[in-house]
Amino acid sequence: MGRVGGANPGRKAHTVIHSIVAGGDCIDDADMLRAGSTQKILGHNVMAPSTLGTFLRAFTIGHVRQLDKMTETVLTRAWTAGAGPGDLPMTIDLDSTICEVHGDTKAGASYGYTKKLGYHPLLATRADTGEILHAWMRKGAAHTGRNASRFVDELAGRVRRAGASGQLTIRADSGFYSNTVIDRCRHHNIAFSITIPQNRNVQSAISMINQDTWIDIDYPDSGIAQVAETVYGNDRLIVRRTRIVGD
């Protein structure tokens, strides 16, 4: 890698990967691979957690993008071998999560709406299998929908190159509702189901729904739920209303 910590990248990378496979979720967990004769079974020298930390801190954005390309290659190979959706429809869930960290020297870690120190990555997962299709690391204080439109661009290209030729549908909560995200979905011919915040215009559209068009749906015994649909702008707006009932 030409940087401090870049020597013997093969051993270090294998140690990190094997630690993850074994259930590790932090650098210190790699130490369990040094127990007994584990190194002989793995076929490589297991590196110490402190060494791995130096190695990972040596990564640049260029290295991250190389790893990103590698994960796309692995996804393509897996789908080519039969694990992919092929020409069948595929639903993709777009979401964000909080990766909490400890220590105030983590680059990019900050406090967001959860009041926890950490990162706020973007994730795209395949609804029927749960496999991660794409991921972006972001600062902890990043808004839920930050860079989501660019993320959709990369996601669309990635899954198409990997072999998904059927209809794609993206599902997301209201944090991702924006004209730019919807524009990118349309650009890539991706259907979308995105929760929309209730502003005045949305409330006005809902109020115009004829009461006779509401349809009952299954709901816990403690309440009643109904759905109906209308048009909001050029899009189909599906509305659910619920009501808690007394004993």
Image (spheres, rainbow, N blue to C red):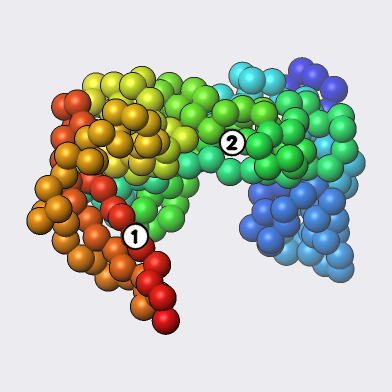
Is residue 13 in sight in this rendering? no
* 102, above or below 200, in the image: below
Q: Quadrant of the C terminus?
A: bottom left
Q: Residues within 10 Å of mark 2 (few under 14, many from 20)?
A: some
Task: Indicate which disc, 1 or 2, sits on the residue closer to the N terminus.
Answer: 2
The image shows residue 142 at horizontal and vertical percentages of 61, 27
Q: Pick the residue in front: 15 or 246.
A: 246
Query: From mark 1 to mark 2, how far is it between C-alphas?
Result: 32 Å
Q: Pick the residue in front: 22 or 26.
A: 26
77 lies left or right of 231: right
Is residue 222 in sight in this rendering? yes
Q: Quadrant of the N terminus?
A: top right
- Element type at marker 1? strand
Q: Residue at x 52, y 25 (%)?
A: 146
Which kind of residue does numbered mark 1 sit on?
Thr
Residue located beneath label 1 in the image: 242
The image shows residue 68 at horizontal and vertical percentages of 53, 31
The image shows residue 73 at horizontal and vertical percentages of 43, 37
The image shows residue 187 at horizontal and vertical percentages of 24, 22
205 lies left or right of 139: left
Q: Which mark is residue 204?
A: none
Residue located beneath label 2 in the image: 121
**Snapshot quadrant of residue 195:** top left
Q: Residue at x 11, y 54 (%)?
A: 213
Q: Pick the residue in front: 126 or 83.
A: 126
Which kind of residue does numbered mark 2 sit on?
Pro
Q: Residue at x 77, y 38 (%)?
A: 117
8 lies left or right of 105: left
